[in-house]
Amino acid sequence: MKLSPGRISHLSHLMLQRLWRDDLADFKDEAEALRLVKETLTRILSVDDQVDTLVRQKLTRQKKVTGSREWQILYDKYFREEMDRRKW
């Protein structure tokens, strides 16, 4: 999933606020914590994009009609399998 840097920043701030508000974490350096959340979120979304590209290539090689019911079922199945392989 492609998100703009602004959206990633916004989500990161929301996540940090929630962690702090729910007393799940304390931060010695809030700026460092924010940087780490942004970096982690970016990496997670990057894996999602890589898997999406891989699955779409696989379905194209199988000559499946994009958007068909069969394509969607196989896409979901292959996406889950690949994410499981990557331990996500």
Image (cartoon, helix red, strand yellow):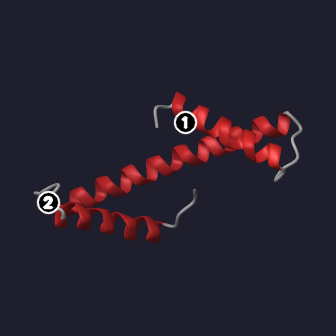
- Which residue lies at the image location 18% right of the left edge and 67% below the top edge? 21
Q: Position of residue 59 (x, y in %)?
A: 79, 38
Who is closer to the viewer here, 29 or 81? 81
Secondary-structure class at tag 2? loop
Callout 2 crowding tier (Cα within 10 Å): few <14, some 14–19, many ≥20: few
Q: Is residue 76 above or below residue 30?
A: above
Type of amino acid at the residue the image marks with label 2:
Asp
- Choose the circle earlier in sequence order: 2 or 1: 2
Q: Which mark is residue 18?
A: none
Q: Quadrant of the N terminus?
A: bottom right
Left/right of residue 12 with respect to residue 46 in the rendered view: left
Q: Quadrant of residue 75?
A: top right
Type of amino acid at the residue the image marks with label 1:
Met
Q: How many marks?
A: 2
Who is closer to the viewer here, 44 or 85? 85
- Which residue lies at the image location 34% right of the left edge and 63% below the top edge? 12
Distance from Cα at disc 2 to Cα at disc 1: 31 Å
Left/right of residue 21 with respect to residue 74 in the rendered view: left
Callout 1 crowding tier (Cα within 10 Å): few <14, some 14–19, many ≥20: some
- Which residue lies at the image location 76% right of the left edge and 39% below the top edge? 57
Q: Quadrant of residue 10?
A: bottom left
Q: Position of residue 27 (x, y in %)?
A: 13, 58
Left/right of residue 84 with respect to residue 62 in the rendered view: left
Residue at image mark 2: 23
- Which residue lies at the image location 36% right of the left edge and 57% below the top edge? 38
Q: Position of residue 88 (x, y in %)?
A: 46, 38
Dot 2 and dot 1 residues touching (CB under 8 Å): no
Secondary-structure class at tag 1? helix
Left/right of residue 61 with respect to residue 7 in the rendered view: right
Of all residues, the one furthest to the top in this rendering is: 85
Residue at image mark 1: 83
